[in-house]
Image (cartoon, rainbow, N blue to C red):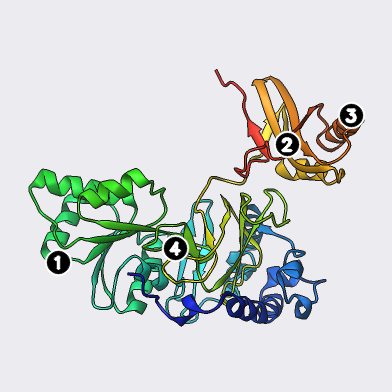
Amino acid sequence: MSSAYDSLETRPPAEREAALMAALPGQLAHAKRASLAFADVLQHVDTAAVVDRTALAKLPVIRKHELQERQLAARQHAAGAVAAGNVFGGFSTLGYGVAMPRVYASPGPMYEPEGITRDYWRMARAIYAAGFRPGDLIHNSFSYHFVPAGAMMETGAHAMGCTVFPGGTGQTEQQVQAMRDLQPAGYIGTPSFLKIIVEKAAEMGVKLPSVKKAMFGAEAFPPSLRDWFLAHGIDGYQCYATADLGLIAYETSAREGLVLDEGVIVEIVRPGTGDPVAEGEVGELVVTTLNPAYPLVRFGTGDLSAMLPGTCPTGRTNARIKGWMGRADQTTKVRGMFVHPKQVDDVVKRFVEVARARLVVSGEMANDAMTLKVEVQGSTEGLATRIGDAIREVTKLRGHVEIVPIGSLPNDGKIIEDARSYR
């Protein structure tokens, strides 16, 4: 299982970075030219000059709520927007027809296009890393209606040369029967549903000896559950993907974080901002995809993670992330007013002495207290008072300031910690 899917996975890191950065200006120019949304977002950007990560980091982050707002605005224009395929808020470069065989919906609702390229969501790489090989039959229990999860996995499996049974969700006894009759090599879906299937099979007195491997997504896959599956003869691995971006990262047999996909550029930024953090620091995953059909540039996933040092012991040389570490949107309401991570960042940026900060909201609802804990380099004389004034100016709320030692704040990506009692 340590062998790579293709030569891209084992190329020298410098070669990969050069290839990604060489492709970036063309992708940005295409997005600006072919999508209404990026014609607006990138209107003042010289795309030919965006040739490295420093230049990329100067572009705005597109967050999910903005994509949804643009989609809603497009839908309100009804017939004209739909006829142009602009129901996607202007981010898709495709119109309805043969180039877009399917449209999917995610909660919101948010609509995502599917293009016609082979392995459109690039899932084959993750399926291969989970141990599947050409000629395998895969039992796919991701949903096949509304959301793209089932199709994401099926197209990846087909690109790998596998056959797929579209099990979908529910009907547990029928799932067990199909596995007994067809003898698939493994399962793709959520870990919780496979656990239910395995337990139902035991209840029915049915053995499933062929199901020896699995690839999971859409849910947490803690070591305790991994060990449960191993005890039942199933070697399970996880991947991280979204309906907007396709595959972002995947687990390997080394089980040391998740290796980044070859078709995306990933940054870790301070939550609420577009500013990259230092290597190893927890922040929000921001992804630029090289997909020409849906060319999302600096798309904020809203998920927290951190880069791991070094490369994967399997020989794959791409960077790795720790995996999903929580949500980046830490907006909270204090004394009836919303406080956003970006506001905290706006305060911090006024003071070069502040290395890191964390706003802690304590007390009880309707009796809140805000304390901004700051790690400070250099002199602290009068600093707390000046920071307190900035807090009030930016948030319109009073806040205490506590100066703490360098390195004392947790590296968990939290900019705002809600420590209130909700009794």
Residue 192 can be seen, yes or no: no
Which residue has dot 1 on it? 182
> Could you say where residue 355 lies in the image, as x and y percent from the top left?
77, 44
Of badges 3 and 2, nearer the viewer stands 3
Viewer-proximal residue among 282 and 164: 282
Of the residues shown, which amino acid type is indicated by label 4?
Tyr
Mark 3 or mark 4, which has the lower sequence index?
4
Label 3: which secondary element? helix
Of badges 1 and 4, nearer the viewer stands 4
Label 4: which secondary element? strand
Which circle marks residue 250 in the picture?
4
State the CA–CA distance, disc 2 to disc 4.
34 Å
Of the residues shown, which amino acid type is indicated by label 2?
Val
Mark 2 or mark 1, which has the lower sequence index?
1
Mark 3 or mark 2, which has the lower sequence index?
2
Of the residues shown, which amino acid type is indicated by label 1?
Leu
Label 1: which secondary element? helix
Residue depicted at x 66% and y 77%: 21
Q: Cβ–Cβ below 8 Å for labels 3 and 4? A: no
Viewer-proximal residue among 210 and 5: 5
Of badges 1 and 3, nearer the viewer stands 3
Mark 2 or mark 4, which has the lower sequence index?
4
Of the residues shown, which amino acid type is indicated by label 3?
Thr
Which residue has dot 3 on it? 385
Q: Residues within 10 Å of mark 1 (few under 14, many from 20)?
A: few
Using residue 396 as the reference point, say whether residue 298 is left or right of it: left
Which circle marks residue 339 in the picture?
2
> Could you say where residue 174 lies in the image, as x and y percent from the top left?
17, 55
Q: Quadrant of the N terminus?
A: bottom left
Q: Residues within 10 Å of mark 4 (few under 14, many from 20)?
A: many
Residue 397 sits in quarter: top right
> Could you say where residue 48 lies in the image, as x and y percent from the top left?
76, 81
